[in-house]
Each structure stands twice: as structure tokens, then as C-alpha cells.
Amino acid sequence: MRISLLIFLFFLPSLLLGQTTPRTLPPPTPTGPVAPDGPLTLQQALQTGLRQSLLVQTGSLEIERQRVLARTGYDLPRTVVDFQVGQISGPLRDQSLNIVQQSALPGVYGAQRRLLEGQILTAEQRARAQRRELTYTIRSTYYELLLNYRRAALLRRQDSLYRRAARAARIRYQTGETNRLEQVSAEARMREVQNQLALILTDQEVQQQQLGVLLNLGRPATIDTTVTPAVVLSPADTAGLTAASNPTLALLEQEIDVSKRQTRVEQLRRLPDVRVGYFNQTINKERGFHVAQAGIAVPLLGGIQKARIQAAQLGEQAAEAQLRYATTQLSGQVAGLRRQLTRAQASLTYYEQTALPQARLILETAEKSFRAGDIEYVEYVVNTEPARQIRTAYLEQIRQYNELALRLQNLAGPDVP
């Protein structure tokens, strides 16, 4: 009898729960990075990054994890099974079986399920915020790379000009038409431009590598260099600061909702649990003695649950305060960016309507004078220097404008579809 009892107790968990094999998710299908052939437009870069970036994949996995956890909302406590054998009610060897199940009221499990569903929405908003941040980084890198191509093209033209100037100054020095200072100055200008060009080309390689990492290409990314290097904003990009346009506000609103659901769960947990059971026993080896059980379980120390409710309510207040603070802060940032962007746009208009035409006029006038023989080549280079400075300043102004436009778009613009 003792051996039979041990065998029964050993296999009891398997008999009650069933033999189950741990379920594992199938391994992901190995797929390599996919990207369109040839140089990428900005839209192609965004779509590629949002499709296969490792950061986006991480957010998707977290959403799926929360969806799986949502199925645990109706988690009943374990069933208690007690088995006894021996001299229970008399000198003879009897046995008894007692099964008890405790459970909260259905409303508690429903509230827990709604809380877990709220956490799914929170994970989705976090993933949306990650997508927005990735979008901003891709755009910033793309436009900075575009500007570096423009800077490199400007420096190449200037390098070609300074090479010819240095050669002319060297010939003039050798023939005694000028002094050593002119030759050295021409050589120094040429070397300086070549150094700047080397730095720009290195920056291009780094940015191409960074963009390739952002898009998860496994190689440096190449872009379409024929488009304008200035950000083009649509009315929707600056429409306003709302939860629909700003993932941070949407996430904070969702956290308020989750806090309220948490408070509701804690309030319902003050209700008593219910207990049901079944008891079967033999007395002096006579069968047929069984009892049905029912009861409730109440906490002896109600203050503990009351403290949990108060803590959940404070969590609601903290989440609401955080939303108000973030709304005020982001609204101030948007207003400041709009003012700065208006000024930057006016500066770009000045360069495009006034400064750049003046630079072209300087170049054309110097070119005519040089071809007519009115000035030497070195003088021609010196006279064209203001035009180069204007064009360099214009590219720097585009960089400042882009930074403001992208920040505003990141705060108030719509999501990339």
C-alpha cells in the first residue's frame, strides 16, 4: 500500500495537468536585407528603414510579447488536491480525497484582461515613438549627406581653380614677374581647399555607412544626389501638436489610461475570493461519504489593499501631471521652432534672390576681365573668393534650416505610412 501511494503521488501532477511539452516559437525565416537597386530616394530610404530596421523589429516583438501576456488575464490559482490514507476515522485504514479551487470574482479577471490589453496599446505607442525617432535620424543623415555632396562639388571647383592659380603663380615667380609671397599664398590656398575636400569625402563615407546601418542594408547606402538639399515641408508637417501627430503625447495619454485600469484592478481586488471544493472519504472502509464545499476568502488586513489603491491613484495623478508638463514643454518647442524656421526661410530667400545672383555676377565679371586680359590669373582667383564664400554660407544656411525643419516635422508631422 505504501508503494502504491508513492507511485500515485509521483504521477498525480501529470494526471491533473496532463503531460505537455514546452512550446517554442519557430525560428525566424532567414531573410537578408532587401533594398531597391541603385541610389535611394528619401522615400525609399524611409520605407526600407521602417521595414527592416532592427529597432523596428524589436518594437514589433515587444508588441507580440504583450499580446501573448494578455492571454494570462484569466489566470486562476492552482487547484489544491489533498489525499490522505491511514487511520483517519477509526482503527481501519481509510482514505480521503479533498479538492479545493479558489477564484476571484469574474469582474477581477475582466479588469486584469483590460489592463493587459492596455499594455498592448502602450507597447504599440512605444513602437510608434521608435519609428518616429528612426524616421528623424534617417532624414537627418540623408539631408546631411546631400549637403556634403554639394560641399564636395563646390570644393572640387575651387580646387581646380586654385590649382591653376598656384601653377600661374609658380610660373610668374620663375619668370620674375612676382615675388615669393604670391606663390606661397597660392600654394597655401590650394592645400587648404584640398584638406577641406578630404575631410568632406571622409564625412561622406561615414554618413553612407551610418545610413546603411540605419536601413539594415549590410553595406553603405547610396542616395539620389540630384534632389534639392533643402527640406520641403508640407502643411501637414506643421499643422499642430496633438497626440495624433506626436508619439510622445500619445504614449503619455496611453499611460494615463493604463494607470486608470490598474487602479480599477486594485479596487476590485478588495472583493472576497470564492472557494469551492469536493471532499470524498471512506470510513472503516465504507465508501460513499462525500461533501461539497463552498466559501469565501477575505483579507484580514484590509489596509494593505487600500494602500495599493492609493498608490495606483497617485500613479494616475503622476501620469496626468507628466502629460501636462510634456504638452507645455513641446508646445513651447514647436512655437520656438516655427519662429526660428520663419527666420531661416527668410535668410534662404535672401541668398536665393540676392546673394547667389551677386555671386554669379562676381564670377561672370571676373571671368570676362580675365579673358580680356585686364587681370592676371591670381587676381582672378582673389576676386572670385567672395563668390565662394557666399555659396559656402548658403550651404551652411541650408543646414541650419534643415535642422529646424526636421525637428519641427519630428514633433508635429504625421507618421510615415
Image (tube, grey):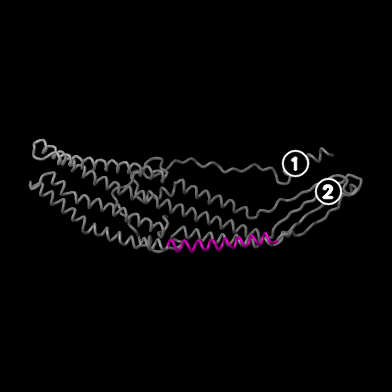
Residue 316 in percent (x, y) is at: 56, 62
Return the residue nearer the eye: 171 or 197. Answer: 171
Asked whether, in this view, residue 85 is left or right of residue 262, the answer is: right
Q: How many marks are shown on the rendered structure? A: 2
Q: Which residue is drawn at 38% across and 48% down?
A: 45
Give amino acid for label 2: Ser
**Residue in the image at 75% along x and 41% along y:** 11
**Disc 1 and disc 2: Cα gap in Å?**
18 Å
Q: Where is residue 263 in the image (x, y as percent from the top left)?
A: 61, 61
The quarter in which the N terminus is drawn is: top right
Res. 11 mark: 1
Viewport quadrant of the C terminus: bottom left
Up-down relation of residue 136 to residue 329 (above or below): above
Range covered by the magenta-colored residues: 302-330
Q: Is residue 72 inside the magenta stretch?
A: no
Mark 1 neighbour density, 10 Å: few (under 14) some (14–19) many (20 or more): few
**Horizontal side of residue 290 vs 187, given as left or right:** right
The picture places residue 80, in percent across and down from the top left corner, at 75, 50
Label 2 sits on a secondary structure element that is strand
Q: Name the residue under label 2.
A: 96
Image vertical order of residue 166 relative to residue 287, above or below: above
Is residue 306 covered in magenta?
A: yes
The image's mark for residue 38 is none
Residue shown at 16% from the left, 50% from the top: 363
- Amino acid, disc 1: Phe
On the image, which quarter does residue 306 sit in? bottom right
Give the left or right position of residue 52, taking residue 374 as reference. Answer: right
Q: Is the magenta stretch mostly helix, strand or loop?
A: helix
